[in-house]
Image (spheres, coloured by chain):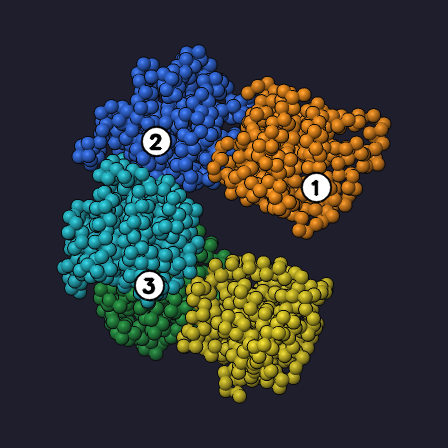
Chain colours: A cyan, B blue, C orange, D green, E yellow
Amino acid sequence: MNDRIREILSWYVSENPGIRTNLARMLNHGRLGGTGKMVILPVDQGFEHGPARSFAPNPAGYDPRYFFELAIEAGCNAYAAPLGLLEAGISDYCGEIPLILKCNNHDLLHEDRDPLSAVTSGVEDALRLGCVAVGLTIYPGSAQSTTMYEELRELTAEAKAVGLAVVVWSYPRGSGLTKEGETAIDVVAYGAQIAAQLGADVIKVKLPSEHVELKEAQKVYEKYQIPIATLADRVRHVVQSAFDGRRIVIFSGGTTVTDEQFFSDARAIRDGGGFGSIIGRNSFQRRKPEALKFLDTVMGIYEGSIQ
Amino acid sequence: MNDRIREILSWYVSENPGIRTNLARMLNHGRLGGTGKMVILPVDQGFEHGPARSFAPNPAGYDPRYFFELAIEAGCNAYAAPLGLLEAGISDYCGEIPLILKCNNHDLLHEDRDPLSAVTSGVEDALRLGCVAVGLTIYPGSAQSTTMYEELRELTAEAKAVGLAVVVWSYPRGSGLTKEGETAIDVVAYGAQIAAQLGADVIKVKLPSEHVELKEAQKVYEKYQIPIATLADRVRHVVQSAFDGRRIVIFSGGTTVTDEQFFSDARAIRDGGGFGSIIGRNSFQRRKPEALKFLDTVMGIYEGSIQ
Amino acid sequence: MNDRIREILSWYVSENPGIRTNLARMLNHGRLGGTGKMVILPVDQGFEHGPARSFAPNPAGYDPRYFFELAIEAGCNAYAAPLGLLEAGISDYCGEIPLILKCNNHDLLHEDRDPLSAVTSGVEDALRLGCVAVGLTIYPGSAQSTTMYEELRELTAEAKAVGLAVVVWSYPRGSGLTKEGETAIDVVAYGAQIAAQLGADVIKVKLPSEHVELKEAQKVYEKYQIPIATLADRVRHVVQSAFDGRRIVIFSGGTTVTDEQFFSDARAIRDGGGFGSIIGRNSFQRRKPEALKFLDTVMGIYEGSIQ
Amino acid sequence: MNDRIREILSWYVSENPGIRTNLARMLNHGRLGGTGKMVILPVDQGFEHGPARSFAPNPAGYDPRYFFELAIEAGCNAYAAPLGLLEAGISDYCGEIPLILKCNNHDLLHEDRDPLSAVTSGVEDALRLGCVAVGLTIYPGSAQSTTMYEELRELTAEAKAVGLAVVVWSYPRGSGLTKEGETAIDVVAYGAQIAAQLGADVIKVKLPSEHVELKEAQKVYEKYQIPIATLADRVRHVVQSAFDGRRIVIFSGGTTVTDEQFFSDARAIRDGGGFGSIIGRNSFQRRKPEALKFLDTVMGIYEGSIQ
Amino acid sequence: MNDRIREILSWYVSENPGIRTNLARMLNHGRLGGTGKMVILPVDQGFEHGPARSFAPNPAGYDPRYFFELAIEAGCNAYAAPLGLLEAGISDYCGEIPLILKCNNHDLLHEDRDPLSAVTSGVEDALRLGCVAVGLTIYPGSAQSTTMYEELRELTAEAKAVGLAVVVWSYPRGSGLTKEGETAIDVVAYGAQIAAQLGADVIKVKLPSEHVELKEAQKVYEKYQIPIATLADRVRHVVQSAFDGRRIVIFSGGTTVTDEQFFSDARAIRDGGGFGSIIGRNSFQRRKPEALKFLDTVMGIYEGSIQ
């Protein structure tokens, strides 16, 4: 194990050796293994957005085995998915890639201003399937956030006791926030802080915009002149907000951007001290050769071989 | 065991041998045993719609033993019913037909825009009664869907640990959907996907219409020209949406159609790669000789002896 | 289901439907399905006598899958084995033959005058593997019999609650008996009675000799002139001793006899009202073609096609 | 152990020795150890107000280790923080300062008129981290107060059984009160009484104003001429309201005052028989040398070396 | 916390912060606090040898409070005793000295060649009483050692989960050893190794003699010329045998020696890298002034102020 990975693991010294072992499995796996950077393939869109919206662009994705193949061939650090998708595909790929069981899910058939994800699997499933971590989404800003924080706390206590790492998708959303506020720099940083306080080992947030949502926060950002002009600045501030960089923070990008914009974002994540990307639709919604090429470029940016 | 059944079981290799044994028991039982197709008799209408609406058309159905006789004589693959109905009838028919315990139920005495079924039995009951599977209804689109998903998750975890298969009735419904949307092709496919993600071994959905409910989905169906013009097309898309056909998906038909229409639907299910039908009122609400004849035709269509 | 099986099941009407379903699965399976007779393949000799003594005569038996194939091809009613043997072989044969999990085992590496088998698996294993029954050996006559009776009682309570049938190997042995007494007619009948009293659904005993072991019993056998002259007489008496024939009693034969003697014994079991045989070494220690032919003859005798 | 500490512990003689041991650990630690006064560093603002508002004034606070250093160097009696902050920092400071695990938290991303904090950690975490106490905030006056009282009751029962002391932040707030009423003397005293009744070992309240909120209370305060004119009077009344001074009551000050005002308040707390201060933002939002100097003055006031 | 204590705690970094906190509490307490050396007062002789043999030499010891006073006044690092003794004395001394709950005990009323201590208290007692550690005696060499190892394993798992340190008295004894062998250097070192392997945080052994008990060990000691000539050599070898000095090993001396001999032994423990002494009868069987003087000398030797 190299010094960078040792350094990252040193931040988790209060966790038991099982958790640190599982973090090491992710950090040392795949093409970025040993760099301290991670690219993770997440596939929960079938549940979250429905099958056609998710898989019609690349119908290979209707088959649960496809994502294992994609993540393995691309050299991702881990693959994250809900229970059914992991169960239906794992059998042929045991031991080939670290797995994260996404333990709650939300669908679009009933839209809520204040969403609450359903807990759809748990720690016993994760152990039975050989996962390295469990993951949960929280929606800070939702009127239901207390419920989600408490579900996360329960899952975290149970997972950590058996040495599983905990990945938190912290996506501010709900009646407490404007639409623009969901990705505001102060709100994304706050979401990262909440996830860290709740015990997350790995924190996933959205890329923050320059907007500042909360009035009280606005005063502070101005008074202390916190740099948020560039994306790299904002990434740096979000990472700082997760225990001064002592927790792994990775970023998601959504689908609305061009490849060039995505690569530019990845450079900003890298330059701002982010730990990598979680890339779903941008990878599995194109055919495999294009997906592999796309991921190859992203990983090249993270490892520094591509500027 | 023939190759087709082996192939179907191979999709479930992550499940324990008990679950695969129970799936094999259904797939190999009755007239369609070994074909990979299934016709299941479900009788939960007494609870769901009240006794007179359910049984007056054929008063033999007031007696719980009647449904065992009907399912056995017709050569169905399985019989599914709530706790009371199974308990009151099973004693004379132990071991004669695979049983599915329907573990939640909903009645009409209190109508809800956003229905929530009551959990009325569980895994211990299913084992005690010698069942091969437990079944649960979920209503994606209901404001109560989170509760139902979480109830399903608990039942699934408990059932699978003891080798029982899990059958999910995924019936989108509730304030998130229009009435027409409940059987829209995108919504039915989405409901099948959700059931698969939640770990269902066998998925029961309604026959989908050509309507597309969700705007975001509409764009995708058009852009990728997903074929949904014929019922067989739509069945194929729903089956694809359940892990690319690697989960057993069966269809229900309701009561509003003529026999000829029903047979035509069965042909579409067969031609679209569906795995069969779950036939309640159409079978038990006519006198036994007519019911047996009706089911004989449906099974003939599935086994291919009738075109 | 035919009248004979219904009659047999009627003796078990106090058991829950799950148990009766699992008894029906055995009684209706294989070549003797529906006759009320059973031939079961048991393979615990690897544990009990060591691998070479057990499998060298027919090395195919070193592979756990072999016994599944043999039992399925021969049309046995069930296959009984310890945990490891079932686990290592089941995956390719789910649903093809009823399984009995043999839950205790004894090895010869430490010989005891008063043997006590180790409990090596349990009800959760049986459910997970899709078994129809659990089995346990007791040694009435051993100084350790109290422990074994109590272990049986615990297993029985747990198994029956979840619908598993209970098979008891009742093999009198230990410091309370002479060697000859282990198969004495009074002792074998006593062993069958104890198993029935302990709640066994299926009782396995050794073929009884004409010897009467216990002095007090001797007086009674003489006073009432209980017929024990022929093997059929003695089988009839043992079956009578298991609740007047209202429990399934099957017989084992050991290895020391010629095939002709074995067939003759089978005729006596049949003529005395016994329910069949459990045939281990006589089947799996010869090559498969010979084993199939041997079992074909035994089954022919039980079904009456061979006199 | 000196007489004053023995006297304080004597009020807790109904608690088990583990709780008294942990109270003694706080009372005997740091610069005020043995005086019966306490200054505690609490840091839950990262969760409660967001990271920038909390830590931008002194960016050292982004690093969880900073608060351990600050509390240790200042000679505080204890450091209180949520799960994540303790976990991420504790490893280098095991055994150096008594820790209080703050077990519920509330964020500002979704503002509620009737707030409910999420339970974010518990007794097992506190033991695993070597804490001396758990802490919980209640909001008397909130429509959700019943939920919080019951959560406190559960945590208290569990914590006391394992010898952990219980610290309650009693902050009246919600639709039952005016803004001014949150710090009204009658309301603060009432909040202290509720905390004591719920079994709190240490009670934290806000400094009370001269305002009396409740009409029925107003009559009594006037009739009996309860002295509330000076802050020392009001502190005395609040302490009296917590079992006549037989529970440790400490006060928080907020951030809106000058240092001189803060010191004056501390004198009033001391002179009114209060047990000390819990000082968060006033300490960690200034650079360490200033913070240490500020805390040095406060502690000097409490120990009497500064008048 | 000074560097030596930090170094010692660094050996325990796989333990949770609670355990390290409790180790720090012992290491930093009393006159030897911060030196890395410990003197512990153990009083289980009342149970082990009977009251008169234990307390008649200094009748003050009949009162459970006496041992708290002695340990506190002498400045011991900790006091270890069985449940009753702690419960009956603790109330007046909460928080004044770290406590070790001795969780198993053995009496002399039934002497066994192969002794087995009774488990007489547990983790819940230790928490309720505010202890920093639980302790257990094992007798390697006893025919009952398997039972004791398994009891220790259970206690260890339970204690460590709640942050309690584990102290093991490893006293080889029983039919597997000669009387002389109980303190043979190879056997004492072996006992230390076993305790370390079983997860002990602090290991207590007897002072080893020059005798080598086991023949196979004898060959190795000779071949590799392991230095065991002086007591300091032997202490060094025992400490090495407990994970190369990365576990705290302390020594007991018994009563058969003169004070001068005891001081000489303490110097050897110090010079050989031992971590201190556990001193029972030598301290509490003389009157308090003499005991304090005796312990003062021993502590002086450990801190280096006395050569």
Q: Are marks 1 and 2 in contact (CB under 8 Å)?
A: no
Q: Amino acid at mark 2?
A: Ser
Residue closer to the observer: E241 or A212: E241
Which residue is labeled 3 in the image? A5
Q: Position of residue D68 (x, y in %)?
A: 34, 68
Q: Which mark is residue B170?
A: 2
Q: Find the distance from the CA under tag 1 to the CA under tag 3.
A: 60 Å
- Badge 1 element: loop
- Chain label for disc 1: C
Picture layout, residue B179 above or below residue D269: above
Q: Which mark is residue A95?
A: none
- Chain label for disc 2: B
Q: Residue at x 46, y 36 (%)?
A: B19
Does any portion of residue D277 appear in the rendered image?
Answer: no
Q: Find the distance from the CA under tag 1 to the CA under tag 2.
A: 52 Å
Which residue is labeled 1 in the image? C139
Q: Residue at x 53, y 80 (%)?
A: E272
